[in-house]
Amino acid sequence: MDVYSCSDPAERAAGFAEAQSAFARSGLVVMPTDTVYGLAADAFDPAGVRRLLRTKGRSRSLPTPVLIGSLDTLRALAINVSPETRELAEAFWPGGLTVICRQQPSLRWDLGDSRGTVALRIPNQADALDLLGESGPLAVSSANMTGQAPATTIDSALDMLGEAIDVYLDAGPTPGPEPSTIIDATGETLVVVREGVVSLEQLHEVVPSVGSAEG
């Protein structure tokens, strides 16, 4: 287990190199995002994702979301993406919007019991975007034990996860515990299943037909 400061260029470079090495051997990395610290594994490594779920105490019935680095990756990973979904992605990515899509059937990954769907987001955090640029898509859940508060500092993540993590990337306190807004884009209409940092009103400014799970 090693902690690397993202504020020091040399230490950041070393941390990113160690993170890539960890991903290559089914390891886990705690990384900053624009909401809370995330616990990351290579999205295409089922062993790494299983380790992530086991470390958090998270059930397979709660599939791990995937962070990506560009809109092009959305097109590569998802099928039947509606024009409205693309409009929202273009408006709020990078940022606090997670979109549940139908995944490409050819994908060889196992994120949990996802029933052929994948939750995708581009985070609005420079270190996270650079890491994604090097690694490709990452399976990322909040850096905490299931049932505990998500970590907004590296010390909090260390207290909860400790030696179970290979690499910690420290970018200072994250903006806060409010999570991303989640939209289900797998049906005929777009539905907000969790409202977070992006409000329903903001979504309606782009796509007025977005619905709410509350009705």
Image: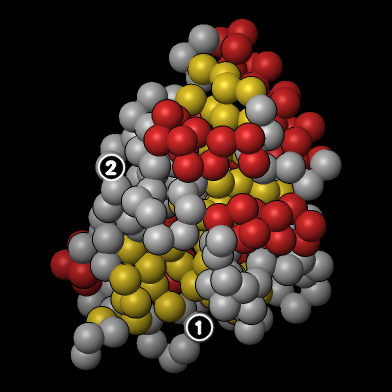
Marks 2/1: CA–CA distance? 29 Å
Which x, y percent locates residue 43? 69, 55
Q: Position of residue 125 (x, y in %)?
A: 43, 36
What quarter of the picture does the N terminus occupy? top right
| Residue type for callout 2 | Gly
**In the picture shown, does residue 66 fall above or below 26?**
below
Q: Secondary structure at mark 1?
A: loop
Closer to the eye: label 2 or 1: 2
- Viewer-proximal residue among 44 and 159: 159
The residue depicted at 77 percent of the width and 61 percent of the height is 46
Q: Relative to residue 107, is residue 174 drawn left or right? A: left
Label 2 vs 1, first from the N-terminus: 2
Residue under label 1:
186
Quarter of the figure with the C terminus: bottom left
Q: Secondary structure at mark 2?
A: loop
Tell me if residue 84 comes above or below residue 67 in the rendering.
Answer: below
Q: Which residue is mark 2?
A: 176
Given contact means CB atoms under 8 Å apart, are the residues at marks 2 and 1 in contact?
no
- Please state the horizontal and vertical placement of residue 51, each as a whole percent of the image: 70, 55
Please name the amino acid that badge 1 sits on.
Thr
In front of the other: 122 or 148: 148
